[in-house]
Amino acid sequence: MSMQKAPLLKVAALASTFNGIFVTILFFFTFSLDSLIYSSITTYVLIVVTGFMMIALSRLSYYYAIGQIGPSRTIPIAASTPAVSAYLASLFLEEPITFKMLLGLAVLMVGVIYVVRSSVSLQDTTDLKSKKRILLGYLSAGATTLNWSLCGTMLKAISKDLSPEYGPFATSMFVINIGCLFAWLLYVFFKPKEKNKRIFPKKNWKWLICAAVCQTIAIPCYTNALSYTLVVNVSSITALQPLVVILVSKIFLDQIEKINLKLIAGALMSVIGTILILLSF
């Protein structure tokens, strides 16, 4: 909702700014400055890389995909991170891969294919421009999946360098604020030349702030979960988003988003795949 008729780069930068402010305030009301010292230089490098990838790049590809194909089709694809996370965590964090997990990942990926094959928004036509736009939207959603999977693995590696009590929250704060700086740099260098294309609509502010508040809760919770269980478990639970998104899209975006049986079937298969992954441990 905050993206309607708004410049993509500015939306990403503003959302990251509010997100960074909120999470920093929460951290300093909860923990002390002594909690912020990591033991390894590698950890600080990972924080910068994760901030750039998770906050700056991922949000751009994610928001762009939503703008092209809508949230109910972007999120089932972007939320299919378990398929990538399982292998990344196995390679870099020595987490196990089981037969049930592979079966769950297969079901989840079939669900994603169903989502992709469901027709896109009602506003789209059959002309070449629309087809190109839709293809770019799906590619952006796929890029978001890869980014989120890599970032989930890196967030866990970073959090392990601090106490589980405050490590995830401190990691989230650093990653969000560094990502915010990168988001503004991207906006400054690639902003539209026309001034009217840089304006952020006043009616979108409430949605932007709501999104930032939700992300302020979601990112630290996600990082905290990574500290207590396997990466594939956490990414599997977050893959349940499609059902919630479809319901919300039906309520608020009924005239733009076409909710059909293929889309619902794909989302349900994603959920079944997620449950199979969780039952594999």
Image (cartoon, helix red, strand yellow):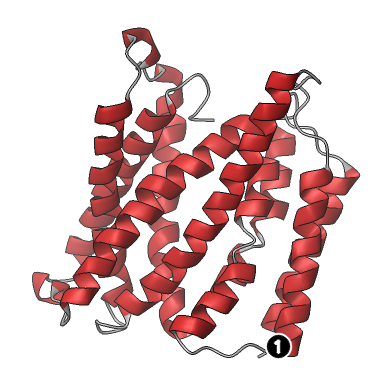
Residue 216's quadrant in the figure?
Answer: bottom left
Q: Position of residue 7 (x, y in %)?
A: 42, 23
Q: Position of residue 62 (x, y in %)?
A: 52, 44
- Image quadrant containing the C terminus: bottom right
Whether 259 is drawn above or below 157: the answer is above
**Disc 1 residue type (three-letter):** Ser
Residue at the image position 44 percent from the left and 85 percent from the top: 93
How many numbered markers are drawn?
1
Q: Residues within 10 Å of mark 1 (few under 14, many from 20)?
A: some
Residue at the image position 86 percent from the left and 54 percent from the top: 265
The residue where tag 1 is placed is: 280
Q: Classify residue 71 as left or right of residue 20.
A: right
Instruction: Answer whether residue 237 is visible to the viewer in this image.
Output: yes
Q: Position of residue 252 (x, y in %)?
A: 67, 32
User: What SS does tag 1 mark?
Assistant: loop
Residue 128's quadrant in the figure?
Answer: top right
Q: Classify residue 220 as left or right of residue 173.
A: right
